[in-house]
Amino acid sequence: MQRLEEPIYFYALAIIPLLLLVLLFKFWWQKRTQKAFANVYLIQKLAPDYSTFKATIKWLFLALSITFLVVALVNPKIGTKLETVKREGVDIVFALDVSKSMLAEDIAPNRLEKAKQIISKTIDQLGSDRVGVIIYAGNAYPLLPITTDQSAARLFLKNASPDMVSSQGTAINDALNLAKTYYDNDEQTNKYLVILSDGEDHEENTIDKAKELDEEGIKVITIGIGTEKGGVIPDMINGYQKGLKKDKNGEVVITQRHVKVLQEIAQTANGFYVDGNKTSNSVNKIMEVLSKAKKTEFESKQFSEYKSQFQWFIGIGIFWLVLDMFVFEKKTKWVKSINLFNEKEE
């Protein structure tokens, strides 16, 4: 297992393309100056030992030296010991609706970003609980399998968008079926599924699916986001708004939050419904339930005793720097003495 202590220093690698520009400018300036002074044949006679190849090699050695010294500043670390750690917690899976109706801005900044805020802030307050993330629209997809790596959950969550699903709609039944496969610990007695959606265009038989979750011992918390008054849906292409979404008749679509279906799902699956328009209120209610839940012990393996590896990169960087100092912009004598074509010196 590897870890980078100070990845911000990677920005220093921008020096390398700047050095390349300096090298190219140097060659251009030399050629221009030489042409103004004399022709190519005379220049070769006046400076027969100059080697463009050697000058390029010197730049390459310097670039390699800078690269390894920058990596040394980043300080890569390698885990040298794998430990099995026992933890206690619950399993919580977030099912995030990423259908285009979630782009409506009746809740600032929009419904989807509000849902992401709720998930992210909830994860921030979790202890050793395991988390997983599902996204769904016309189909449901696993975004992150259930894991103890909560930082990974935040990272994957940040990129969730309607562009990640191949078809639009609200296939909550698929999300409920997928959620059942997420809980890989049979001994876990507290399994939670948090559904974040505007409740619009949900499928039939959703209540039957919710009953199946209840039979599996999965408690469902539904969080409704949006307003009953509703809002328009931005028509986005590659992250830019080109207009507003319209129906077949050319009328602008107004999307509303449908609370009833979300409440029925939660009640059927032994859970509860939360108004998600206020982030803090939603997070507090989720954490209130989780704090009272019985924690189940599980094992996870993780690396410990990370050791710094910067010294290796410093050594290699210094090696290339020293090598650069001993390379001169002159042709090597033994190479110069080779006459492959038996040319006669004039």
Image (cartoon, rainbow, N blue to C red):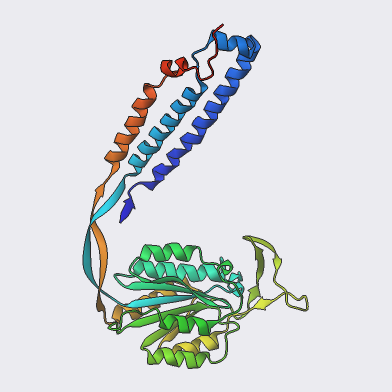
Left or right of 200, for residue 340: left
Between 233 and 210, the residue placed more toward the observer is 210
Residue 220 in view here: yes
- Residue 69, percent from left and from top: 36, 36
- Residue 143, percent from left and from top: 46, 70
Between 96 and 302, the residue placed more toward the observer is 302
- Where 70 falls versus 26 (above or below)? below
Numbered disc total: 0
- Where 12 falls versus 298 (above or below)? above
Quadrant housing residue 302: bottom left
- Where 202 falls versus 330 (above or below)? below
Q: Which residue lies furthest to the right in this view?
A: 249
- Where 269 falls versus 15 (above or below)? below
For the point 53% across and 15% down, the residue is 342
Between 182 and 245, the residue placed more toward the observer is 182
Quadrant housing residue 259: bottom right
For the point 36% across and 41% down, the residue is 71
For the point 39% across and 42% down, the residue is 9
